[in-house]
Image (spheres, rainbow, N blue to C red):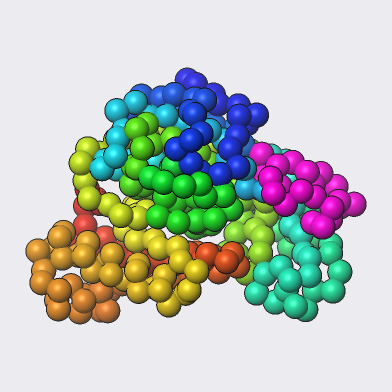
């Protein structure tokens, strides 16, 4: 099985980035990643103001998927996530929802062992590994890996975890996928501006779904299907994700707009993935059990 090293990275998603790794549709492979700080913080003596912010959220790749082309959908299945032996959480003035209350930068190193993140002597958090950055090259322009969008990237959605499938629209030949920013634990919203950031490696399987309409990322778990939207305004993000789910229900359940809208309100939930970046990400959940959805496509 192929293993892609973490030393080949991009700092933005762009079709100008030539792929460095190559896989076939249906192939399974491993990707090694650094943490979101590109390994700059190893001890509690290193503070966020000390590091180079411009290289944060670098992503391993690009990974070209043979047979993927514009108008297709890339299905990325997360098979395994292995974490390093420690994670890091920083605070810094202005960082996170209550960043104005932070007057001094501080770094906390958190050991990861035996299935737990040892937050302190009394608190051990069960690990909930997830991938923060996962995306493809956009059709035009260059987007920093820290910024989420219709191409995916830094969505910081805690459901990008083992057992999930992420569906991404393909804009360029090969898709040019890249990923990084692993977390040992992270709650919805990433409210302090950081999860437990860590290095590690992930096992993925990619497939290409030919000529399917998809404007933005979707996500599928065993229990539910999600539409995701990333916008600078939370209300716009909500409206976009809701509209995408209504259109999905209309298609999958053969409903007119009014009934799909009613079904959404009766059975679906709006959830926040992250709201600490300038571009925030929200998602709408449609439970499979209630809606009898077998798969996204």
- The answer to which image quadrant residue 257 occupies is bottom left
Residue drawn at x 71%, y 68% as measured from the top left = 95
Q: Determine whether 210 is above or below 286 in the image.
A: above
Residue drawn at x 25%, y 79% as measured from the top left = 266
Of the pair 99 and 226, the residue shown nearer to us:
99
Q: Determine whether 210 is above or below 146 in the image.
A: above
Extreme right residue here?
45
Q: Is residue 46 magenta?
A: yes
Q: Is residue 143 left or right of residue 251?
A: right
Specify whether residue 237 is in view. yes
Of the pair 30 and 51, the residue shown nearer to us:
51
Q: Determine whether 73 is above or below 203 in the image.
A: below
Expressed as whole percent of the image width and height from the top left, the position of residue 46 reads 86, 51
Q: Determine whether 282 is above or below 63 in the image.
A: below
Expressed as whole percent of the image width and height from the top left, the position of residue 91 reads 77, 64
**Main secondary structure type of the part rendered in magenta:** loop
Q: Is residue 2 magenta?
A: no
Specify whether residue 182 is in view. no
Q: Which residues are magenta?
A: 34-55
Residue drawn at x 49%, y 29% as measured from the top left = 18
- Total number of numbered discs in the rendering: 0
Q: Is residue 223 left or right of residue 279?
A: left
Expressed as whole percent of the image width and height from the top left, the position of residue 61 reads 53, 33
Of the pair 55 and 209, the residue shown nearer to us:
55
Expressed as whole percent of the image width and height from the top left, the position of residue 122 reads 78, 63
Q: Is residue 200 left or right of residue 71?
A: right
């Amino acid at each position: 099985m192929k293993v892609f090293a973490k030393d080949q990275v991009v700092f933005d998603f762009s079709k100008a980035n030539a792929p460095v790794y190559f896989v076939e549709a249906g192939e399974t492979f491993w990707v090694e990643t650094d943490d979101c700080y590109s390994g700059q913080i190893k001890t509690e003596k290193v503070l966020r103001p000390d590091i180079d912010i411009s290289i944060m959220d670098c992503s391993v790749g690009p990974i070209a998927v043979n047979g993927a082309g514009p108008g297709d959908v890339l299905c990325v299945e997360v098979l395994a996530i292995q974490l390093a032996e420690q994670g890091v959480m920083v605070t810094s003035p202005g960082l996170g929802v209550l960043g104005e209350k932070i007057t001094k930068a501080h770094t906390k190193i958190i050991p990861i062992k035996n299935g737990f993140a040892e937050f302190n002597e009394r608190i051990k958090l069960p690990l909930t590994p997830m991938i923060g950055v996962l995306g493809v090259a956009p059709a035009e322009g260059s987007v920093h890996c820290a910024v989420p969008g219709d191409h995916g990237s830094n969505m910081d959605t805690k459901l990008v975890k083992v057992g999930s499938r992420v569906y991404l629209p393909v804009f360029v030949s090969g898709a040019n996928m890249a990923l990084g920013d692993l977390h040992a634990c992270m709650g919805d919203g990433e409210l302090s501006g950081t999860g437990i950031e860590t290095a590690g490696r992930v096992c993925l399987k990619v497939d290409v779904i030919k000529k399917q309409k998809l404007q933005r990322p979707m996500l599928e778990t065993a229990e539910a299907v999600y539409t995701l939207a990333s916008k600078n305004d939370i209300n716009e993000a909500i409206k976009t994700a809701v509209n995408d789910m209504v259109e999905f229900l209309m298609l999958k359940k053969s409903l007119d707009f009014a009934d799909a809208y009613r079904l959404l309100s009766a059975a679906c939930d709006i959830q926040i993935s992250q709201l600490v970046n300038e571009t925030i990400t929200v998602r709408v959940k449609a439970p499979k059990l209630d809606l009898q959805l077998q798969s996204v496509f």
